[in-house]
Each structure stands twice: as C-alpha cells, then as structure tokens.
Image (cartoon, grey):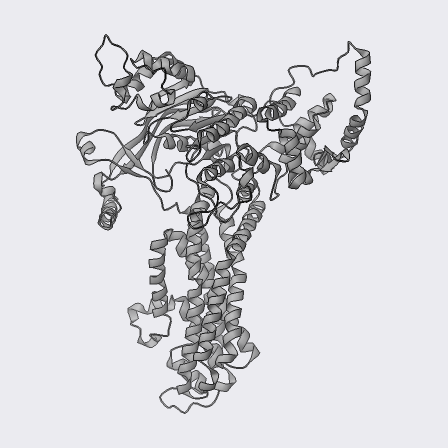
Amino acid sequence: SGASAQSSNRRSMSWGSSISHSFRQPDTDDPFRRAQSRSDNDEENLRWAALEKLPTYDRMRHAIVLNQDGAGLVHIEQLARGEAGRALLERVFQDDSERFLRRLRDRADRVGIDLPAIEVRYQDLSVEVDAFVGSRALPTLWNETTNFLQGLIGRFGSSNKRTTTVLKHAYGILKPSRMTLLLGPPSSGKSTLMRALTGKLDKSLKVSGSITYCGHTFSEFYPQRTSAYVSQYDLHNAEMTVRETLDFSRRCLGIGARYDMLAELTAREHEAGINPDPEIDAYMKATAVQGHETNIITDLTLKVLGLDICADNIVGDEMTRGISGGQKKRVTTGEMLTGPARALFMDEISTGLDSSSTFQIVKYVSQLVHVMNDTVMISLLQPPPETYNLFDDIILLSEGYMVYHGPRGNILEFFESAGFRCPERKGVADFLQEVTSKKDQQQYWYLDQEQYRYVPVLEFAEHYKSFHVGQQMLEELKIPFEKSKTHPAALTTSKYGQSSWESFKAVMSREQLLMKRNSFIYIFKVSQLIILGLMAMTVFLRTEMPHGQISDGAKFFGALTFSLITILFNGFAELQLTIKILPTFYKQRDFLFSPPWTFGLANIILKVPVSFVEAGVWVVLTYYVMGFAPSAGRFFRQFLAFFATHQMAMALFRFLGAILKSMVVANTFGMFVQLIIFIFGGFIIPRGDIRPWWIWAYWASPMMYSQNAISVNEFLASRWATPNNDPTIDAPTVGKAILKSRDLFTGDWGFWLSIGAVIGFTILFNILYLLALTYLSPSGRSNTLVSDEENENGTNKEQMCQGSHK
C-alpha cells in the first residue's frame, strides 16, 4: 500500500504538457502483417505482462533483459553495477552516442513528457576585486608583513588596495538546446563569468547585476547543484582510480529527478498500453538507482570520454605515477557529467588534450545539448575549426567587456561592419582572439579607402549594442522569463544529492579506501614505535631501575615522560595527511558533494583504531620490561591514558592542518605548538616554578594532564606505598612524596580528572576541526596585479594571477 501511495504521489506530479499528439499505432492496412507481428511478439508481451503484474515498487526495480538464455526479468541492482550493467551498456550504446540519446528522447516524446530545460540570464553583471598595485602584490616576506599591517589599518581608515573591475556590465542569455563557446584572450574574465553564473565566486569579490535561472534568482534554488562547473584545475585524490573517482562524484551528486521522471514515464506508458524498448527501459531504471558504490552511469561516462582504457589506474600526483595530464583533465570533466545537472559550464577543458580528443568530447556534449535540451557553455582557448563549428553561439570577452554574444554565423559579419575581416585561410577562433589585441589588430583591417586606426575593446562593445544581434539580445532581456513555464525538475531546491546518512556512508567508504591505499604510512608509524620501544626497553631496563625510594622516582618519571612524548609526537603525521587532502575537499565542499562534517567525522572515527593500535603496541612492548607497577589494572589504565593522549594529539594536529592549510606554515607552527605544550607540560618546569602570569599556560597544556594521569597511575601503586622518611616533603608515602615534589596530583582522583580533561581537549579540537572545514576558505586566492605604469595612467587593464582557484 505504501508503494501504491508513493506511485500515486509521483503520478500527480506535473511533468510538462499533456500528451499533445497521438501515439504510434500498428499498421491497420495489412491484416496479415499485423497478425505476423502479434505472433512474433507473443513471448515479449507475456514478459511485459508478468512485469506489469508486479507491485509498483517491484516493477520499478525489475527489467526485461536479453542474455545468453534468452530474455527474462532481472533485478535492477544487478544491472546498476558489475558486468551485467556493462554488457547492457555495450548493447544500448553501440559506439553511437547520438543514436543512444535519440532512443532515450524518443521514449519521453511518445508519451508527451517534456525534458527539463534551463535558461540562464545575466544583466549588467560586474565583478570587482580589491588588489595591490605593482610589486606590492609579489609574495615576499616584506610585502606580506606590510600588507597585513596596512590591512589592519585599512579597517579603520584608508586601505592601500586599488579596486579593479574584472567583469564589466556583461549581459546575455544562455538558451537550452544551444551550445555556447566562450572565447577571449587570457585575463579577459572568462573564468570569472563562468564562476559567477554558477554561484561559485569567491566571497571577497564584489558582484553587482542580476543572474537568473528560468527567472529565479540564486536565493530560490541551489545553483551549485542546478548547474555543473568543470574547473580548469585538476584536483583529485591521487590514490583513487579513475572509476572510483567518478563513482564517488556520481554517488554524491545523486540521481536528481531521474526516479520521479521514470515513475511518471512508466505510468503514462501503462495507461497508453505502450511497451517501451526493453533495453532503454532497463538502462533508465539502472540509472535511477541511488546509493550504490558503482553504477552504469559511471561506465557510460568512462566510455564517452575515452577513459575506459585507464578506468582501473590510479589518478596519481606529483609523487605518485598515475594517468596522463590529458586523461586527468577528462576525469575532471567526467566528475560533473556523472551528475544530474542540466546546465554545464566547462572551463578550459581542452588543456592537455589533443585536438581529436577535444573534438570527440565537445561532439558528445553537443549531442547532449541538441537531443536532451541541456544548456552548455564551454571555454576554449584556441579551438580548431572542426571543434569551433560544433557550437551554436559565441561569446567573446576582452578586458572584461562583452564584445559579442550571439549566433556563430553572425560574428564575422559583426567584425566586418567594424572594418575587420577574417582571412580565408585563418581559423575563425584565432581571428577572434587577435582582433581585439592592439598588437595584432591592424593585419585584419580591410577598408582600404579609410586609414586604419586602433579600435579599443570598449568601442567594440558599444558597436555590438547597435548591431542587429545585440539589439535583439537587448530586446529579449526586456521581456522577463515566465516562471510558470519552468519545468518542475529544472531547478534543484535540495542542498545535497542524497540524505546526510547516505552522504556520510559514501564519505566513510572513500576514507576507508584512502586509508587502505595509504597503509604504508600507518605501517611505518607502527614500525617506528616498535623501534623506539626496543630502544626505550634497553635504556630503562628494569634490572637497573630500583623502586621504593624518593630518589628512585626520577628514573621512572623520565621513562614515563619519554613514553608520553613519543605517543604525543607520533600524531604529528596527521598534519601532513590533512593538508594533502584539503584542496580536493574544498572543491567537493563548494560543489555541494556532501556536508563538510561528513568528511571530518569520518576521519575522526577511522583514526580511533589507529590510536588503539599505536597505544597498545607501545604499552605492550614497554610496560613490564621497563618495570612499571606489575598490576593488570595499572597496565590498562596506562593504556587508556596513552590512547586518550594519542587521540588528543591527532585531533590537535588535524585542527592545525585545517586552519593553516600550507605544508610549510603548518610544519613550522606545528613544531612551535609542540614546544609550547612540552614546556608547560609539567616535566621541564614544575608548577611551583612557573611565574603567575604564565600559570594559565600550564593549565591549558594537554600534556600536563596526560603527565598527571600516567604519573598518578604509577606512583600510587602499592609498591610505592612505603612510609616517607623525607621530612622536607609533607606526604605519608614515598609515591605521594614524589608526586608532590613535582607538583602533580596526589590522589587517585587525579587520574580520572586528567583523563576527563584529555578527552575534553580531544572533543574541543575535533569541534574546532569541523568548524574549520565548514567555514574556512581555501588558502589559494586570486591576486590581481596592476602595474605601476597602468595605475599612474589610470587605465583599467588587469593581469589575473590565479592561485588554487579563481
């Protein structure tokens, strides 16, 4: 009954206009042919009848699939992953992507279902950034110090930065079923425009103007999920294979409205008595399965991007050999293609690719646009003519100005009206890159009767407004988009592609895989502990460590402190591991792959066994050999203290890595924090010798509590309970006298108080770590450099120096 109600709710959803044309009917003019057709299809009709008898929930999860034993009902989960799904894809795709997409579109057209379509409009769009001028933007120690101090002063008065306009009053319309090429010389604002249209601009930039999707502003939906932005930077987990990388992105991005659309499609076909193509039906049902680690969509993406030959190779990085740069660029593209977004913005996807690979990718995207009603903008630097001819519209940017936005066939006419003509043997894309350049412009001047003069970019932009294409664009912008015509599935109003629990499971699975691939690091850390433990066992050998006297306590106290320092500093590796994965994490966080806390919580949980093993190895090796109190209870209490200390150390260094974000800075500052914790840890300087104005640092040092825990655990044992004969120390037993001489806790309560404090520090550092992941921005930033000469002349030319993102 629940499944029927779910089906009824989905059927009530509006999926476009009602059926506007009649369905295809069998040929009624030839009764013999009709009889023969019925005879041939009897077996297939029986299979469809068996499928129709299933409840709605089960019917959506079974499909008719041909195999070696003939056709039969197969559970859809068998097709969504594994060899069965790849075999189905081979039969459906058949190396003809356009025919495959047509078959998908035809099924929807037969029952009058409109596919989602997105129209993107932007008007008077300007982007400004505060920048340092000339040499002041260079990353030197003096500049960083001076800029920081003047930045503080600038909060209360004038700032030493200059405001530079990156994008200047841009306007236009990106229509569905049309593919737009974004051209322009370097530093013209192409990436800034794309990031603005997808809602991914840095928050420090000043944005003015309006951007709407189907008449809706960004506050009404999530543009990061409605559109897909393919960055020009290849940020991936080096240890994951190509297939695993695409599977993770597909799993996080979700299925969108595929299931609801398929339910409506199936209901209309059932009402009309139409049996769909069984292979297409099986494929569509397989793509609507959510939550699995692999899916047929991943296999399709690998195939169309030519990545199937390296699907099981790791991506790699500077230190690990992996796939080539061109293949890595295709992986970046494939990450976004696995999602359900119907608006694609692809930034410099041809970097590292040969012209043939670029053509094949753009050709497939062109088929997506024209068959499936997608909206696509692609930025290319120097596309070859065959790739250029695949596009419908052209946008030309230069120096932040919109020089042209309109049909590809009219752009040469536009420049001829301004006095410039593209030579016959010249590529149009190359011509467009050079015609606005002061150095290259003159060679394209063709008005012999008029003397050439340099035409600045601003004049081209003004000329476009009087050109008939520009006038038509301005007229269309005056007519607002009717929100009522927006397809129900066009805009995404949910922040993430799946539930929080499913997101956490996906991230947890990914982090487990990364730990497995990085197992050498953890094996090395344990091996390091074993070697240090063997050394400590021989240095603090129990035959040379008598007990029972106050003078004997120094050796045991030193052994305990050495053990504590070893455990504490062994968590330092967490600093490098955190910083290494941050660039990929920030990209996926900003693209709304999953909530930031899922990544942080998965790391916290998965490192608990690491602390358990490392603390256990150390205690098992050293406890009895060094001659600590021979009691099982004392043994496990020391293990608990070291386990809590290791967890606290890992939480501390994770937090430092998340806020410092740079390996050099983190290593330097991390060692500084270690020294501060060590100095106020209670070993080098006892509490009674610390000056009053520094006593707060003593109580704030996590190591102090760990030192108290392991010391109380040892020196309150029965073997240290002999009477104290030292009149200078007011303590009843030798053990308490040793603790009191070091200004440590002298009661058994001190152990549990210290353990509670260490656990509190662990929780505090983990919370700060999660907050840093959620709210801090990546360390790379866009630095705009304005030369001193240009600043003096008052010109507006910019040169964008990109950091890890624009």
User: Which of the pair 76/719 is nearer the observer?
Assistant: 76
User: Which of the pair 689/656 is nearer the observer?
Assistant: 656
Seen in the picture, residue 185 relative to 551 is either above or below; the reply is above
Q: Is residue 379 left or right of residue 284?
A: left
Quadrant where the image shows the C terminus: top left
Quadrant of res 652:
bottom left
Seen in the picture, residue 190 relative to 692 is either above or below; the reply is above
Q: Is residue 225 left or right of residue 788?
A: right
User: Which of the pair 655/42 is nearer the observer?
Assistant: 42
Q: Position of residue 375 (x, y in %)?
A: 49, 25
| Residue lying furthest bottom | 725
Residue at image x 46%, y 48%? 321
Seen in the picture, residue 410 relative to 185 is either above or below; the reply is above
Does residue 705 appear in the picture of this structure?
Answer: no
Residue at image x 38%, y 52%? 659
Q: Position of residue 540 (x, y in %)?
A: 44, 80
Q: Position of residue 433 (x, y in %)?
A: 33, 24
| Residue lying furthest top | 449
Residue at image x 41%, y 29%? 379
